[in-house]
């Protein structure tokens, strides 16, 4: 079955369209070989959009200003759980400059989150949408919001997953607070038998916090109707998903919605779908007959546009004296907020190491808070923190070096589906990383350093899905001066997609980079592409670009053959020329060919082929942390992170390093600082700004050293790219946690490892 | 030779790129047959962009407002001929809000018009560009322009073609005022022998005036740089020509320039190329690091963006008593303004009627005025006025009915190249038109009506090039809900291109019109298409759309065959379904197919095939006018115009009728009202606004009755469309002139036929 095949080979977001790739046979070029030296691909080209960004001329959705544009703001529920008994918008409507006030009373009942609505009278969390005011200016809209009189019936709330699982807890849904009424489960082998075979068994509980995506660019849409046709400028990771979502909500054809996004200031999973704000703006724009811009402020982003669910993970591991893992058990629960989402985090335990007996039970729990959403490596960041902590403790118990212990349990094939990997270059990552961090100098006795500031070294492995995900197509067109344009329906979410696409096209057609321009982020002008998430953009799109370029080469040769009146077999393509093998008079530059033949022959379309069947595609890696812990203040400083990864082929080592740095920093931040805190009694978020929700600054940055141990993976596509978005972040918190243990000899089992937790662990 | 072939089969603007169409063999569907009944094509669908336009939500280049956008205005030479001795911009630069002042001193020397520059110190006409001011607002820019101090050396001027041809005239160029130093010539047969064979010879001189395009929408560009990449929102008939022109002027790659135009408020030939204003705005935007908007006001449009050259045509015709034309001679000169253009107008005489002996001599003459440009049917409007006036006089001389005279000299093949027409349905047009106007009731004795208001009926024939011109391609993509998008690099200049493209796609794929959206006017997203001029858009683009749709059908069938695992030969396409011929279980709707197969199989590209070799493609027609002339006031009122044309297949009879009305009105206006007047002594234009430059209003409108006598022309393309933009206007002035003669019995040999000319002719 197709969907089964897809699930085997890559990660899909729960609500993502699982599109079967075309089974029509397609010709694909041979993949670049693993060690093939390429002229453009892999090289550290600066972003072709770099100037726009550093100069400030880059225009984001936020910067779209249309003539006669109105501004919208949202009234959100100030309570954790309530029902609207009455709403009076008359004062707001009378305020000068107010154009419209949307509520559940004057808008269509548009389904949202399965069982709720765009405007629901049952408000399930602080931040739930109550009304939307459209006015001449943002400040008038904000004033008007304060004039709306809502009569709330306050309901009991629950904002903690454990409490929510109790029978006595206030219920968010009639069917109870456990999503689907039961845990997600998984097992292989016989876990009890495995534990019986073990010489040592450890069971422990690890906790991770809720984190907020908090991208730099706020969520924002600008919408404009031309008759029945809607254009949306949106800050989104998935232009086609926004198109589909908005069209479905408004019950209009897909053709009638055009979504445009040129640049984005981060999403991290919080911008994968159409937001309520976009649909509210579209409804309002239709009503008032003017373009509407709607933006969320930082507080709204901290309440209502997603988060990483927390986790309470109880892990149990059994090991023989020789280091063989005999059994792993995982029980967890996590809060997914007020609407369907997913708190599962067991995949690392199921897949990272060789282990025949595994059992998993994991609960996703509703609470009165904003809904969880995918957040860079959903499940894996929290899962690895628990798994790798347990592994280090098991290794210590049997007096084995933690790295040796991991090598002892190195998985030679996929553990869940029992199929081979397309490639796995993890041993080399362990070696490079260990050498670079100075693993041989690591203190074998945790906490044995002298003085109050103690230093430690730790590590963590990493696994993630790899290879192409959503459908991907690219169109190339050659202009009459020999310059090339790449057009695709994907989007650059800030990771360098514009640049690497140009590199792949320039590589395949042997053209200078300056000759290649790239158009992305417009649903009207390119075939469907998937959302950018799950580390799938580069592995999905790069083969489409290469294949389009190879198609163009073939077209150039056949065009030149017709034009020069020689057989195609006598012609070869080199560096913008079609050359005759023997007769130099019969050569032609492609710009001349374009001018003389018309540009038609110079348009080509390429698509990504399907992932290979019968294989698992994964990225692998290891990160090593060198930390120091001040045992008097409890403050942890990360001195260095070494990140060594197998991510298939590198497309651009500079943008890759950027992305790696970003991932490591986001991991460090999750390990040490970030936490959304809700007051249990009021049910209200107390960390709703960037002062209280802590993030690192330049002063907190470690040295970061990167090693890419892989070449291209020719099994998976014509470019051999696996992906790197999530891998960069996955192992960082676990590596830091293990380094902290190595430094102080006491394990911190709860993130973030703030000074209070360190001091409590040391002295309580 | 390819270029020869192209010139034979269609009209090209002088400076247009003559692109050879691809010789690579392409598969094309069979053409729709001449009388084939089609479901969508031809039907009077309202414009799909109609709502945008009537509601005012349509955004033109003029309406583009970018954040931080500056405004530019142009200082133009107030003299007819001058040289800049000095220029002092300091006061202007000091004015608060002024951002930059561009002149010849601080900008690169960019070639323009062959021998001149973007800013030339030799100013050859009133309106020539001297400086460009960029400021925070338009009114500041206008103020600043007044503060620029220019020291002009005034030079002698000449603003009349006849004077300019004298040796004593001030010279615009060292080589003299006659372009190329000699007339354009043509001859076939032996004209003197032809005149010797004639029983009657008439020689007369006809004059037409200079007219200004004056489209509703002013010329305007908004430009924005992102680093090295320039986006231009422009009011243009040729997005790719603007791209090429701007890129060449700035010496940057074509890839670096993106030109966008969604809607346009008329061009008529005045917007076929990149304007100086666009390049000035681009230079300024680069300098100040902000977007710049530049607009021309109505005076600038009347001075500096083109006109129809005037003509003084001396025609001589010889005819036998039986009505056989034995010889035609044409001598003409016309003013092309200060820069290279073309005043030739002999093509009607060379091609309309069968005549073996023809000789032509025509001069294009430089004067100190704005440059002539193509204007709806360049040469033909003025040429037919002279030719058809002469023909009526010849017919009267031999006592033959004018219509009978024309039928007598009906050309059965192309007269210039001596090759057959693909089709010619002119006899039917004569018949329909004559019946509708009541030709049988026409007074045979001109001026014989009783009373001061005299009525008359007259007619004129029409010929114009037809068939595809510039390259044309279309891309179709099918969305997963079965809606279809058409993307092409052409542009809608107001003629209904969005709508007819949707109709052709809907026809070929048997889909409802609501399912089809069209994207045009963006150089970044589609392959090269030619400019919209010369009546070439519909005949060029409609076959590309149809061919793309047929390609998509083939893809749908092969995709469905693979998906359903049945041979392609068992499947047929009908109305959005791929059906198995016998097994109804093996049918699939295309939206489902798209979802299941991925959208790749659902993208197709189509191109127009080449025009057939060895044939001439022409449109033909005849217009009949019913007028009344008040012999006391000299005022002419046109009661009715009957327009009967052979334009190949009709794509949309409603937009066709719109275009026909527009052409007739523009012809009527040229016949009776419009005239650019220059004061000979000052060399300055006195008719620079819409008060002094007369145009008709609703009160001047005649009844207009339209007959399309042709079906599709299957010889020329898969859609059989010939084109209608210019044909609509060509015969109108001549028909009115002949009707006026029929009414009053005195011939007016000079346009416009204003009351003073009528009274002078009658009573002087």
Image: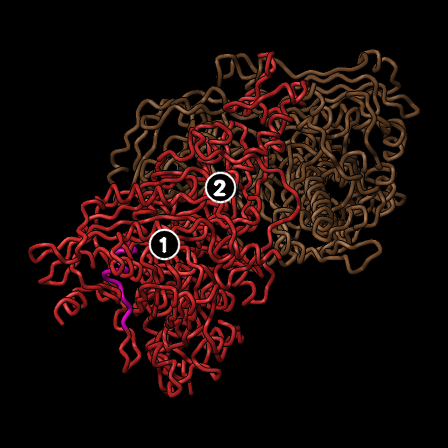
Chain colours: A brown, B red
Give the x, y percent position of residue A730.
71, 36
Disc 2 secondary structure class: helix
Disc on res. B266: 1
Q: Report the quarter where the C terminus of chain A lies.
A: top right
Give the x, y percent position of residue A61.
49, 46
Q: Earlier in the sequence, mark 1 or mark 2?
A: 1
- Give the total number of marks visible in the rendering: 2
Q: Which residue is mark 2?
A: B542
The residue located at (66%, 17%) in the rendering is: A184
**Magenta span:** B666-677
Give the x, y percent position of residue A701.
69, 50
Residue B141 forms part of the magenta stretch: no
In the image, taking residue A326 as reference, residue B396 lies left or right, namely: left
Which chain is mark 2 on? B
Quadrant in the picture for residue B429: top left
Disc 1 secondary structure class: loop
- Tell me whether the residue at label 1 lies in contact with that at label 2, contact meaning CB atoms closer than 8 angstroms: no
């Amino acid at each position: 079955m197709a969907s089964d095949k897809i699930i085997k080979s890559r990660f899909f977001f729960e609500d993502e369209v699982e599109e079967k790739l075309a089974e029509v046979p397609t010709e694909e070029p041979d993949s670049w070989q693993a060690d093939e030296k390429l002229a453009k691909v892999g090289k550290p080209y600066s972003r072709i959009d770099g100037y726009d960004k550093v100069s400030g001329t880059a225009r984001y959705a936020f910067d779209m200003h249309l003539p006669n544009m109105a501004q919208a703001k949202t009234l959100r529920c100030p309570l954790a759980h309530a029902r609207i008994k009455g709403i009076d918008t008359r004062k707001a409507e009378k305020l000068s400059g107010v154009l419209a006030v949307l509520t559940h009373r004057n808008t269509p009942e548009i389904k949202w989150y399965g069982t709720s609505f765009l405007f629901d009278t049952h408000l399930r969390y602080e931040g739930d949408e109550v009304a939307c005011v459209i006015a001449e200016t943002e400040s008038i809209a904000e004033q008007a919001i304060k004039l709306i009189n809502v009569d709330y019936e306050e309901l009991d709330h629950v904002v903690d997953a454990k409490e929510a699982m109790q029978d006595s807890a206030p219920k968010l849904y009639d069917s109870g607070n456990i999503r689907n009424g039961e845990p997600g489960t998984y097992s292989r082998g016989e876990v009890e038998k495995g534990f019986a075979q073990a010489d040592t068994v450890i069971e422990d509980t690890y906790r991770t916090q809720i984190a907020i995506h908090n991208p730099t660019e706020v969520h924002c849409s600008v919408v404009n109707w031309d008759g029945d046709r809607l254009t949306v400028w949106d800050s989104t990771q998935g232009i086609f998903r926004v198109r589909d979502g908005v069209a479905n909500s408004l019950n209009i054809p897909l053709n009638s919605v055009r979504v445009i996004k040129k640049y984005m200031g981060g999403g991290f999973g919080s911008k994968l779908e159409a937001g309520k704000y976009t649909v509210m703006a579209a409804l309002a724009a239709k009503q008032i007959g003017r373009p509407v811009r709607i933006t969320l402020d930082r507080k709204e982003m901290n309440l209502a546009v997603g988060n990483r669910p927390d986790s309470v993970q109880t892990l149990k591991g059994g090991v023989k004296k020789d280091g063989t893992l005999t059994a792993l058990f995982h029980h967890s629960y996590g809060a997914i907020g007020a609407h369907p989402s997913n708190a599962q985090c067991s995949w690392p335990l199921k897949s990272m190491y060789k282990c025949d007996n595994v059992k998993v039970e994991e609960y996703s729990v509703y609470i009165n808070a904003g809904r969880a959403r995918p957040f860079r490596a959903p499940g894996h960041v929290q899962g690895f923190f628990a798994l790798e902590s347990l592994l280090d403790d098991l290794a210590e118990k049997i007096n084995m070096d933690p790295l040796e212990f991991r090598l002892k349990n190195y998985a030679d094939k996929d553990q869940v589906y029992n199929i081979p990997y397309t490639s796995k270059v993890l041993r080399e990552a362990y070696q490079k990383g260990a050498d670079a961090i100075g693993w041989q100098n690591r203190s074998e006795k945790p906490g044995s350093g002298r003085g109050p500031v103690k230093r430690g070294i730790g590590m963590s492995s990493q696994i993630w899905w790899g290879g192409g995900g959503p459908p991907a197509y690219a169109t190339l067109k050659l202009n009459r001066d020999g310059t090339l344009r790449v057009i695709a329906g994907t989007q650059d979410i800030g990771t360098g997609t514009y640049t690497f696409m140009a590199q792949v096209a320039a590589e395949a057609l042997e053209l200078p980079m300056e000759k290649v321009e790239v158009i992305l982020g417009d649903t009207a002008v390119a075939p469907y592409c998937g959302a950018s998430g799950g580390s799938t953009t580069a592995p999905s799109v790069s083969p489409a670009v290469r294949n389009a370029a190879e198609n163009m080469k073939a077209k150039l040769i056949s065009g030149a053959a017709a034009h020069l009146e020689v057989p195609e077999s006598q012609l070869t393509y080199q560096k913008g020329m079609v050359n005759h093998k023997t007769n130099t008079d019969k050569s032609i530059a492609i710009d001349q060919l374009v001018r003389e033949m018309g540009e038609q022959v110079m348009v080509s379309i390429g698509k990504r082929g399907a992932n290979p069947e019968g294989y698992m595609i994964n990225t692998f890696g290891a990160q090593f942390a060198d930390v120091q812990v001040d045992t008097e203040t409890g403050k942890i400083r990360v001195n260095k992170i070494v990140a060594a990864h197998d991510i298939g082929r590198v497309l651009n080592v500079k943008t890759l390093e950027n992305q790696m740095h970003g991932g490591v920093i986001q991991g460090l931040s999750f390990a040490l600082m970030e936490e959304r805190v809700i007051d249990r009694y009021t049910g209200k978020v107390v960390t709703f700004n960037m002062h209280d929700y802590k993030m690192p600054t330049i002063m907190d940055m470690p040295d970061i050293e990167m090693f890419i141990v892989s070449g291209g993976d020719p099994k998976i596509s014509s470019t051999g790219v696996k992906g790197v978005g999530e891998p960069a972040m996955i192992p960082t918190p676990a590596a830091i946690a293990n380094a902290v243990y190595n430094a102080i000899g006491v394990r911190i089992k709860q993130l973030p490892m703030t000074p209070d937790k360190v001091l409590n662990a040391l002295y309580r």
